[in-house]
Image (cartoon, rainbow, N blue to C red):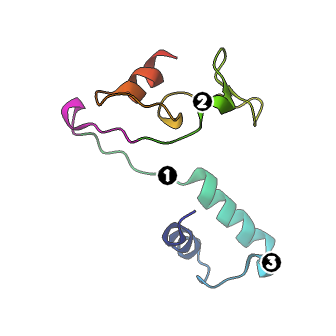
Amino acid sequence: MPNRLADALTVEVGLPVDARVAELRKDHREALLDALTKYRLPYTGHRGYGLAEVTGGGVPLTEVDVRTWESNLLPGVHIVGELLDCFGRIGGYNFFSAWTF
């Protein structure tokens, strides 16, 4: 996790940035866990398909069963689309895989 994100979440739950995990009370640890797993990011719209961009990277295709898209490392977790390391010419190949698999 990037340090800036960790610092921001720590401050958001009311803890000092230099707090040590081993010294946190249970309620503080639970607050951090909630911040990590339930944090809401507001969605206000998009700028249209013409400005959409896709970056490369993600879970290697060798780490998923391509018949079911289940992770080979985490049984029960299925991975498709933008989460996969799926490259092609510019033009939305990751979008294509996200919408069709």
Q: Which residues are magenta?
A: 47-55
Residue 60 x %, y %: 59, 36
Would you say the magenta stretch is mainly helix, strand or loop? loop
Q: Mark 3 to mark 1: distance in Å?
A: 26 Å
Query: Mark 2, mark 1: which one is toward the viewer?
Result: 2
Q: Position of residue 37 (x, y in %)?
A: 62, 52
- The nearer-to-camera label among 3 and 2 is 2
Circle 1 — which element?
loop
Q: CA distance from mark 2 to mark 1?
A: 29 Å
Say which residue appears at 58% left-offset and 73% top-offset.
10
Q: Identify the mark at residue 71; answer none if there is no mark.
A: none
* Residue at image location 22% in from the left, 33% down from the top: 48
The disc labelled 1 sits on which kind of residue? Arg
Q: Earlier in the sequence, mark 3 or mark 1?
A: 3
The residue indicated by pointer 3 is 22
> What crowding class fits label 3: few (fewer than 14 Cα within 10 Å), some (14-19), or many (20 or more)?
few
Please tell me in which quadrant of the rendered image residue 3 appears: bottom right
Mark 2: secondary structure? helix
- 3 or 1: mark nearer the eye: 3
Q: Quadrant of residue 80?
A: top right
Question: Mark 2 highlights which residue?
Answer: 61
Residue that numbered label 1 is attached to:
40
Q: Which quadrant is home to the N terminus?
A: bottom right
Coordinates of residue 84 in the picture (x, y in percent): 53, 33
Label 2 amino acid? Leu
